[in-house]
């Protein structure tokens, strides 16, 4: 009986160690994949060719390089919040739009709603295109601090960190 219990305990210990090794291996693989993905995004030339999700990640890489702590929240059901960024005690909501057409006031109002829901006073709306006069007017009326970053400003920002992004799909 004693050797039976010893064998069961040994097998249980080996199984537990095997599960821990599998979990550790999976974490290492996922970290490697994420590192390669960020590396690929950091060397992307045509940011308009990125998927919306990859564009959000590209912007997240820029914020990280700028010294922000970044939490990605994008995806369906994100309530207009693609990224939450924090630096110097200030948390901001970021909405990323990889669009060809100029962003209008409706998108700014969506950002204001997202900021209200998140309980933050600072927001950024970042796009590969530009902003309409109506969008800029909506920002001036907003009860929050909102920064608009168009495609040209985004490329200048990327280049300050040595990223080779360009907007090639302006047709």
Image: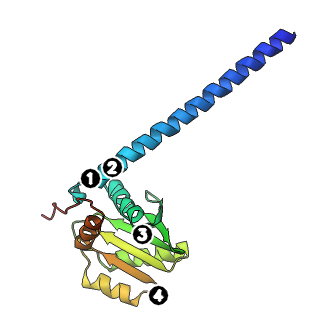
> How much space separates mark 4 and mark 1, taking CA atoms?
37 Å
Q: Which residue is mark 4?
A: 143
Element on which disc 1 rests: loop
Label 3: element kind: strand
Q: Residues within 10 Å of mark 4 (few under 14, many from 20)?
A: few
Q: Residue at x 62, y 29 (%)?
A: 19
Q: Give coordinates of residue 72: x percent, y percent.
A: 46, 59
Question: According to the image, label 1 marks what residue?
Answer: 43
Q: Number of labelled discs?
A: 4
Residue at mark 2 to residue at mark 4: CA–CA distance: 38 Å
Read off the residue under disc 2.
39
Name the residue furthest right: 1
Q: CA distance from mark 4 to mark 3?
A: 16 Å
Question: Circle 2: is it few (<14), some (14-19), or many (20+) Cα within 10 Å?
Answer: few
Q: Do the CB atoms of the residues marked 3 and 1 lie less than 8 Å apart?
A: no
Could you tell me how far apart the alpha carbons at marks 3 and 2 are, in whole angstroms?
Answer: 22 Å
> x%, y% of residue 150?
27, 73
Query: Residue 23 sits in which quadrant?
Result: top right
Measured from the top left, where is residue 123 in percent x and y? 43, 76
3 versus 19 height, above or below: above
Q: CA distance from mark 1 to mark 2?
A: 6 Å
The numbered mark, 3 or 2, whose residue comes first in the sequence reads 2
Mark 2 touching mark 4, by CB under 8 A?
A: no
Q: Nearer the viewer, mark 3 or mark 2?
A: 2
Residue indicated by mark 3: 94
Q: Are marks 1 and 2 in contact (CB under 8 Å)?
A: yes
């Amino acid at each position: 009986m004693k050797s039976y219990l010893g064998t069961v305990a040994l097998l249980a210990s080996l199984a537990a160690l095997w599960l821990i090794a599998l979990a550790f291996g999976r974490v290492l693989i996922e970290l490697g994949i994420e590192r390669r993905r960020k590396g690929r995004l950091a060397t992307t030339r045509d940011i308009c060719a990125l998927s919306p999700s990859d564009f959000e990640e590209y912007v997240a890489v820029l914020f990280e390089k700028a010294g922000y702590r970044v939490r990605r929240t994008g995806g369906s059901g994100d309530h207009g919040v693609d990224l939450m960024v924090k630096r110097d005690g200030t948390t901001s909501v970021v909405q990323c739009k990889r669009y060809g057409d100029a962003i209008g006031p409706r998108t700014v109002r969506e950002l204001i709603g997202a900021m209200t829901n998140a309980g933050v006073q600072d927001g950024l709306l970042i796009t590969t295109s530009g902003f309409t006069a109506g969008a800029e007017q909506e920002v001036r009326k907003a009860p929050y601090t909102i920064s608009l970053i168009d495609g040209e400003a985004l490329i200048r920002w990327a280049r300050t960190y040595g990223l080779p992004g360009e907007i090639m799909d302006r047709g």
